[in-house]
Image (cartoon, rainbow, N blue to C red):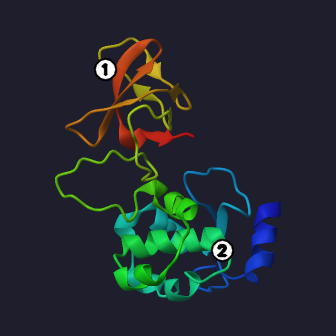
């Protein structure tokens, strides 16, 4: 058990900070942050973490605890509650919730709650974080580059990316001094 996990268990009374479940608890760090900390992490049931990371598996019944967790005194719990309420389009609870400007900016950092325009192309990394022109990303797996004599290695940083305007699944970046197209499902946004 990590030090942060122990502190989160102390903070939450060893229960999921969203549902109140007592078993199968894991630490979830809220993007865009990557390092576990009390200020950026929550203790959640593993099945909820799986749903956070895979939006297509969301089960609305598993998130009934949001009506309580949205009032939690700890900001990371409030941020996660806001994001999941936005994903579930529960506008009644969202309208009751208050986050200051800085907290709301953090809550919206993954694109949850953004006004949806069905024609708008949104580029997202492997974790669902919205990508913008000029962002830096890291490759999450080795990629064979078609038409080139090298493999883009896992962990390679790609700085100053450019979004492919007509395809949400592609970005353009420079790897080993060559401009290449990269599928967004194989990158993770860095700070």
Q: Position of residue 66 (x, y in %)?
A: 51, 83
Question: Would you call the spot at circle 2 few (<14 residues within 10 Å), some (14-19), or many (20 or more)?
Answer: many
Residue 71 place in picture, x, y as percent: 59, 84
Q: Is residue 190 left or right of residue 151?
A: right
Q: Residue at x 70, y 56 (%)?
A: 36
Element type at marker 1?
loop
Q: Is mark 2 on a helix, strand or loop?
A: strand
Mark earlier in primary sequence (1, 2): 2
Task: Calculate the distance from the C-alpha at mark 1 to the C-alpha at mark 2.
Answer: 42 Å
Q: Compared with residue 109, is residue 185 higher up or lower down, i.e. above or below? A: above
User: Looking at the image, which residue sits at the far left?
Assistant: 119
| Residue depicted at 18% across the width and 58% down the height | 118
Say whether residue 20 is left or right of residue 146: right
Residue drawn at (29%, 15%) of the image: 147
Q: Which of 138 and 147 is in front in this view?
A: 138
Task: Give the x, y percent position of residue 190.
Answer: 55, 39
What's the mark number on residue 25? 2
Label 1 with label 2: CB-CB less than 8 Å: no
Answer left or right for 44 relative to 66: right
- The residue to which callout 1 is attached is 146
Front-most of 79 and 127?
79
């Amino acid at each position: 058990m990590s030090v942060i996990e122990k502190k989160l268990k102390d903070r939450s009374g060893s229960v999921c900070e969203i549902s109140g479940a007592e078993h199968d608890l894991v630490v979830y760090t809220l993007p865009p942050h990557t390092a576990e900390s009390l200020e950026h992490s929550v203790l959640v049931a593993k099945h909820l973490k799986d749903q956070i990371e895979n939006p297509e598996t969301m089960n609305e019944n598993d998130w009934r605890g949001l009506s309580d967790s949205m009032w939690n005194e700890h900001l990371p719990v409030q941020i996660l509650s806001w994001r999941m309420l936005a994903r579930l389009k529960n506008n009644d609870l969202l309208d009751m919730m208050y986050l200051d400007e800085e907290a709301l900016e953090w809550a919206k950092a993954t694109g949850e709650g953004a006004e949806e325009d069905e024609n708008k192309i949104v580029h997202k990394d492997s974790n669902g974080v919205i990508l913008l022109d000029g962002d830096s990303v890291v490759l999450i797996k080795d990629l064979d580059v078609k038409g080139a004599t090298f493999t883009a290695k896992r962990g390679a940083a790609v700085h100053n990316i450019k979004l492919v305007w007509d395809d949400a699944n592609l970005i353009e970046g420079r790897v080993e001094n060559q401009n290449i197209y990269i599928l967004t499902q194989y990158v993770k946004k860095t700070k």
